Amino acid sequence: MAFLTIRGLKSYSLAFRTFKRVNSRPILRFPVPGPPRRLASTSATEASSLVTRLKNLLYGTSLALFLGFSYLYVTDTRAGIHRWLVVPSLRILYPDAEAAHEAGTKILKALYASNLHIRERGNEDEKGDLAVTVFGHQLNNPIGTSAGIDKHAEIPDALLALGGAVVEVGGATPYPQDGNPKPRVFRLPSQKALINRYGLNSLGAEDMAMRLRERVRLFAYHNGMGIDEEAEEFVLNGHAGVPPGSLTPGKLLLVQIAKNKFTPEGDIAAVKRDYVFCVEQLGKYADVLVVNVSSPNTPGLRDLQAVGPLTELLSGVVEAAGKTPRKERPRVMVKVSPDEDDDLQMQGIAEAVWRSGVDGVIVGNTTRRREGLVPAWHKLSWKEEQLLQEQGGYSGPQMYERTLGLVKRYRQLLDQRPSPSADVQTNEIPFGTERKVIFATGGITNGAEALGVLQAGASVAMIYTALIYGGVGTISKMKAEMRDLIHG
């Protein structure tokens, strides 16, 4: 019994140790049961996914903000990139000045078509501190761009968006003509000046009329008026509440016209037919028609500034403009040369303006003269010395004093009815007494100079080379300078 008991106890003890060792494994050695570990893994994955989504949202928002601010900056006329990067880059990429001009035109045209064009942002003009009244229209400001920047009326709206209240396109001739052989445009960077002898290269009046007609019809279409001839007439007759030329409240579109190179200047009847044809094609799409008799690059054109021929020519243009199939006729201005500056020449031009019924004068264009343009103390490089001798019209800041003096003199002449010259047979001046308007162009580069010509008697200061060298922000810069001077 004792033996069995002892053996039994031993067996019992062995069995107990075995049971204890086996049954202790789940507690001491087995891993955490499956379901709790799977729940922790799912939570970690979801947390990681949330972090990724937040990062993507942050990156996307940052990119959108960057692109948005970049768009607002690059498309603003006030952005320094246009003056300090774009203009020098065009000059480097296109050593030929005409090629650079054409490239700039194509870029502005493409940007406007895609609504990525440069524009003046803000509503500074709404203050009215720079407003002027011209031909019954209250203009937002007195700054404009001269013809030559948009020769074929390809980018009038892109130019209007830069902040000026006046854009002049052209000149257009009755038939297409190539102008003078290339190269025909030359830069003088040290003087911020240009010499050009384009010779009135034109695609023709009908081509420009087609382009301007399409522009009016697209305006009508986008404003829910249709796109047919009836919609066009609705806009041109003023029912859309905008000027028929600019299609923009507070702004005007000028269309410059000229004779063909092959039309002999001595045949005044033929010359008049050239201009009248242009009026018939383009008159209804213009707020103002500009008769160009001042180009130095079309042989004999400036001879038309003699009082007799000029009076006959301008009378024909005014008569044709009066027949424009539109409720309000386009106004007519004549662009005169800065080189016709002796007293008799200017008196004759003023007399022709009064006798013909022309509404105003654009004073200034390029000059054939070279004396006194470059300050005596300034030494030009050898290359620029050679370029200065190129034939053609010179334009640049050095023209400003001449322009200012001409504005003062023309203001005095046009504010009184001049005595008739000997080659005019009648003393009668049959037209009304509305004050003649003067636009000034030639050498105006900053706000102080713009105010100078306005105080001298001009209604609008027009720029050309200032825009070429200063970039698309030039007009906004000039207006800011004018406001600083006005308001102290």
Image (cartoon, grey):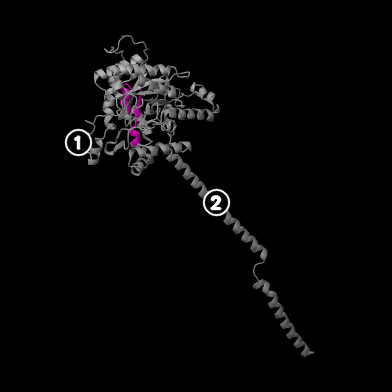
Q: Residues within 10 Å of mark 1 (few under 14, many from 20)?
A: few
Q: Residues within 10 Å of mark 2 (few under 14, many from 20)?
A: few
Name the foreground residue: 1 vs 426.
426
**Distance (Cα) linking label 2 and label 1:** 65 Å
Instruction: Quickly name the residue at label 2.
Output: 54
Task: Return the x and y of residue 297 as percentages of the image width and height.
Answer: 30, 29
Q: Which residues are magenta?
A: 450-468
Q: Per the image, is 327 magenta?
A: no
Name the foreground residue: 320 vs 256.
320
Task: Return the x and y of residue 48 as percentages of the image width and height.
Answer: 57, 56
Instruction: Quickly name the residue at label 1.
Output: 377
Name the foreground residue: 272 vs 64.
272
Q: Quadrant of residue 26?
A: bottom right
Residue at 41% x, 18% y is 320
Instruction: Residue type at mark 1: give it.
Output: Trp
For label 2, the SS is: helix
The C terminus appears in which quarter of the rendering? Answer: top left
Task: Return the x and y of residue 439 as percentages of the image width and height.
Answer: 34, 24
Is residue 129 visible in the rendered image? The answer is no
For label 1, the SS is: loop
Instruction: Residue type at mark 2: give it.
Output: Leu
